[in-house]
Amino acid sequence: MNNVILIGNLTKDPEYRETGNGVCRFTVAVSDGYGDTESTSYIPVVVFGKTAQNCSKYLSKGRKVGVNGRIQTGSYEGRNGKVYTTDVIASRVEFLSSASNSSTSGEKPATDENEASQGYSQIMYDDLPF
């Protein structure tokens, strides 16, 4: 089983490229532990299709998101030899903070039922099971 669930904040605005289907890349900062043992991991996320378009349109630096997907590893030849990559390929992205709660003043998330059915919905913190 290859399943990943992350909750964290975007470290910068998403990068979108139209590739026929569309691809969006962003990095999520995820904290682990607390107090003196707290650490932060920076996880690269890749999203495709309609979900990629919505992420590009509605997400911005500082927004809190929930990501569900799978880990994918790869490699390519760089200037100094082989470079290994690890990404989360997202199948679902949840907007966990509104645009007004983030550090930037982007557009508000869509409330259209069609976009919500694509895996986008606004979740209140009180609704989270933990």
Image (tube, rainbow, N blue to C red):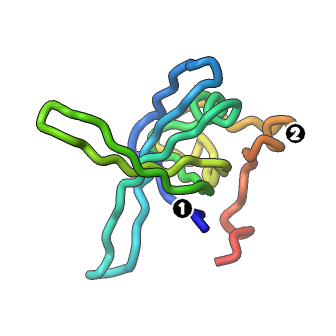
Residue at 42% in and 47% down = 44
Displayed quadrant of residue 31: bottom left
Q: Which mark is residue 6?
A: 1
Q: Is residue 74 above or below residue 128?
A: above
Quadrant in which the N terminus appears? bottom right
Query: Which class describes the residues within 10 Å of circle 1: few (<14), some (14-19), or many (20+)?
Result: some
Q: CA distance from mark 1 to mark 2?
A: 24 Å
Discs 1, 2 touching: Cβ within 8 Å:
no
Question: SS for tag 1?
Answer: strand
- Quarter of the picture containing the C terminus is bottom right
Residue 27 is labelled as none
The secondary element bearing badge 2 is classed as: helix
Percent from the top left, x then y, of residue 79?
A: 15, 31
Q: Is residue 113 left or right of residue 64?
A: right
Give the class, few, some or many, for how many residues have Cα within 10 Å of label 2's Cα (few <14, many ≥20): few
For the residue marked with disc 1, what is the amino acid? Answer: Leu
In the image, residue 118 above or below residue 54: below
Near-viewer residue (103 or 88)? 88
Of 78 and 91, the residue lying toward us: 78
Q: Quadrant of residue 100?
A: top right
Q: Is residue 102 left or right of residue 81?
A: right
**What residue do we see at 34% from left, 47% from top?**
85
Label whose residue precedes the other's in the sequence (1 or 2): 1
Q: Horizontally, is 10 left or right of 98 in the view?
A: left
**Residue 18 sits in quarter:** top right
Spot occupied by residue 120 in the image (x, y as percentages of width and height): 73, 45
Which residue is rendered at x = 41% and y = 53% of the image?
A: 43
Q: Is residue 15 above or below residue 68?
A: above
Q: Position of residue 50 (x, y in %)?
A: 70, 31
**Three-letter residue code for mark 2:** Glu
Tell me the residue that label 2 is attached to.
113
Q: What residue occupies the far left of the structure in this picture?
A: 80
